[in-house]
């Protein structure tokens, strides 16, 4: 069973409601598959059809909401939705279909949904007006974590400066260097942060790990799958990337990392 817990809530009621129903559809599909009451072809047609149709409706609602609020992440969301839709459309139901084929597709849907919610949907409506300043509101008062957060803001600022480098026409190499630096430093930071949470037996460590994994996967996908797009339209690519990186970083610090010292304080008061 896949539970729709609080760490998957975006704070947008209509989107959260549809996400929760997608979780229900996935659980129903897995239960039905385990029962094997019908021919796998008929069962797959019903299960996959329901999931795909509801997902498409959800994507349309989500994109309409983002368009309404002029969310700059909309183009990236559309690409991710299109990739998921293509994967579903490519799934063939014929006489050669096996139970294992359906299980693998359901596993893909689960991984994609978890990652997409944590790494992309959490960013809807969260773009900041002054995103490059590491201000007091981001402080956890855990010195090592705050210092690394500050460095992450600095790396993203470098990328923003690159966007506006007036006389640097071909930015491909510089883009790749920044992406690589960001990925490496983020990996290191997440490892340090998780080690700290483990050392204090922080109860939300698993939720943090899921969010970290989703973000790293996003960075890896950018680095591997979008290289051609970078070279063709560097300016638009970097602008969208900057919006996403800063939004995710600030939201994760405020809504997840800043809860760590609050929990520590409560433990000391109760202890």
Image (cartoon, rainbow, N blue to C red):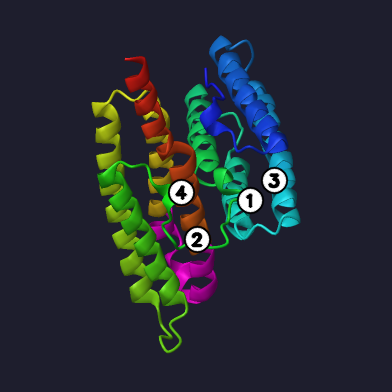
Indicate whether 76 appears above or below 58. below
How far apart are the two marked residues, 4 and 3, measured between alpha carbons?
29 Å
Contact, mark 4 vs mark 2 (Cβ under 8 Å): no
Q: Position of residue 254 (x, y in %)?
A: 47, 43
Q: Which mark's residue is nearer the viewer, 3 or 2?
A: 2
Point out which mark residue 229 bears. Answer: none
Looking at the rendered image, the disc whose residue lies closer to the viewer, 4 or 3, is 4
Name of the residue lying farthest toward the front: 269
The earlier-in-sequence mark between 1 and 2 is 1
Q: Disc 3 versus disc 1: distance between alpha carbons?
A: 11 Å
Earlier sequence position, callout 4 versus callout 2: 2
Few, some or many residues within 10 Å of mark 2 (<14, 14–19, 20+): some
Distance in Å between CA atoms under marks 3 and 2: 24 Å
Which callout, 4 or 2, points to the residue nearer the camera?
4
Secondary structure under the numbered disc 1 in the rendered image: loop
Q: Distance of mark 4 from mark 2, alpha carbons?
A: 12 Å
- Residue 200, image x and y in percent? 27, 26
Instruction: Tell me which corner region of the image, top left, top right, bottom left or bottom right, holds residue 42.
Output: top right
Magenta stretch, residue numbers: 221-241
- Across and down, in percent, residue 206 comes to 38, 28
Pick the quarter of the image with the C terminus: top left
> Which residue is nearer to you in this view: 85 or 202?
202
Q: Nearer the viewer, mark 1 or mark 4?
A: 4
How many numbered circles does the render carry?
4
SS class, disc 3: helix
- The residue pinned by badge 1 equals 125
Q: Which residue is mark 2?
A: 131
Please tell me which residue lies in front, 178 or 58: 178
């Amino acid at each position: 069973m896949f539970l729709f817990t609080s760490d998957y809530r975006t704070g947008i009621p209509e989107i959260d409601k549809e996400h929760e129903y997608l979780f229900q559809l996935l659980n129903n599909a897995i239960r039905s598959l385990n029962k094997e009451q019908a021919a796998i072809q008929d069962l797959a047609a019903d299960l996959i059809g329901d999931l795909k149709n509801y997902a498409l409706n959800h994507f349309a609602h989500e994109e309409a909401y983002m368009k309404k609020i002029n969310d700059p992440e909309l183009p990236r969301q559309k690409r991710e939705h299109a990739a998921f839709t293509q994967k579903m459309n490519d799934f063939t139901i014929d006489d050669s279909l096996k139970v294992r084929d359906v299980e693998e597709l359901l596993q893909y849907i689960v991984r994609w949904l978890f990652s997409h919610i944590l790494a992309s949907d959490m960013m809807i409506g969260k773009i900041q007006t002054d995103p490059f300043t590491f201000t007091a509101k981001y402080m956890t008062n855990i010195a090592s974590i705050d210092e690394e957060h500050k460095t992450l803001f600095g790396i993203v600022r470098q990328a923003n400066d690159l966007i506006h480098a007036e006389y640097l026409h071909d930015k491909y190499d510089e883009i790749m260097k920044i992406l690589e630096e960001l990925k490496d430093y983020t990996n290191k930071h997440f490892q340090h942060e998780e080690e700290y949470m483990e050392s204090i037996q922080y109860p939300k460590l698993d939720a943090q790990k899921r969010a970290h994994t989703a973000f790293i996967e996003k960075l890896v996908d950018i680095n591997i799958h979008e290289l051609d797009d970078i070279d063709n339209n560097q300016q638009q690519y970097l602008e969208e990337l900057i919006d996403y990186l800063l939004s995710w970083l600030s939201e994760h610090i405020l809504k997840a990392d800043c809860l760590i010292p609050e929990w520590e304080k409560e433990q000391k008061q109760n202890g």
